Each structure stands twice: as structure tokens, then as C-alpha cells.
Image (cartoon, rainbow, N blue to C red):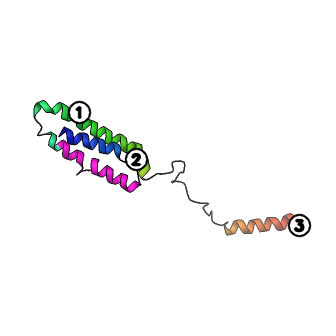
Amino acid sequence: MIERISSLVQEAKAFVNIDPQEVEVFRIRFLGRKGILNDLFEEFKSVPGPEKKAVGQALNTLKNTVQSRLDELGAGSKHNRKSVDVSMDYSRPSGVLPLGSRHPLSLVRRDILDIFSRIG
């Protein structure tokens, strides 16, 4: 089992970032719900007592290697999946809101004041 884990560590180190879809496939293959690491941790339960320490260390090395590789490639960061512009306040109104119009009595009053101010 240790040989298999060490070959997976070498495979994880050798993975090259070609495009984001392949990085996501790599992440799912190793860290997914039905991924390699989950299977290995399930098999770890049946490892005899004296070998548990070595196999556990190898599993942790594999897990850390895969996670660090994903962090290097940018797939492990949460902000990379769907980036949101934090400088923009999305709760603000989108534009100038119309305020409406003047009350009819205010319009008549303004017209009367204009007439009397012209007369003197």
C-alpha cells in the first residue's frame, strides 16, 4: 500500500496545469467524495497495527502534496471559482431615481409670484 501511495505522490507532483477543467478533474480524482484519498483512508482502517504509523504518514504526505499542488495551480482557492468584485457595493441603487413632479398648487403659487415680481 505504501508503494501505491508513493506512486500517487509522484503523480501529483508531476501534474502540469493545462487548463482549468483538467485541474478540476485532478481535484475531484484525488479529493472528491469518491476520490482516491477517500478510498485510501477507507483501506487504512484495515491496515494491521504495526504498519499503521508508516501508512498514515504516507497518506498524510499524499494529502498534503495534492492540496499544495492544487493551491499552486489555483484550483484550491475559493475566490478563483467565482470571483466577486468587493470594491463594488451591489446594495446601492443602480442609477438616479426619479423624484416625481411638483404639486399643482406649488406650480400655481410660483406662477403668481413670478407675475407679481414682474409687476413690482
In which quadrant is the C terminus drawn?
Answer: bottom right
Question: What residue is rendered at 54% in x and 48% in y?
Answer: 87
Where does the image place residue 84, in percent across and percent down from the top left?
48, 51
In the rendered structure, which disc, 2 or 3, sits on the residue that comes first in sequence?
2
Give the number of the disc on residue 57: 1
In the drawing, does residue 79 fall left or right of residue 112?
left
Marks 1 and 3, Cα distance to the nearest angstrom? 99 Å
Q: Nearer the viewer, residue 106 or 46?
A: 46
Q: Which residue is mark 3?
A: 119
The secondary structure type at the circle numbered 1 is: helix
Circles 1 and 3: CB atoms closer than 8 Å: no
The secondary structure type at the circle numbered 2 is: helix
Marks 2 and 3, Cα distance to the nearest angstrom? 73 Å
The answer to if 5 sits in the magenta stretch is: no
Q: Badge 3: how crowded within 10 Å, few (<14), some, or many (20+)?
A: few
Q: Mark 2 vs mark 3: give the one in front.
A: 2
Tell me: residue 28, above or below residue 1.
below
* Main secondary structure found in the magenta portion: helix
Quadrant assignment, res 72? top left
In which quadrant is the N terminus drawn?
Answer: top left
Where does the image place residue 98, in percent across and percent down from the top left?
62, 64
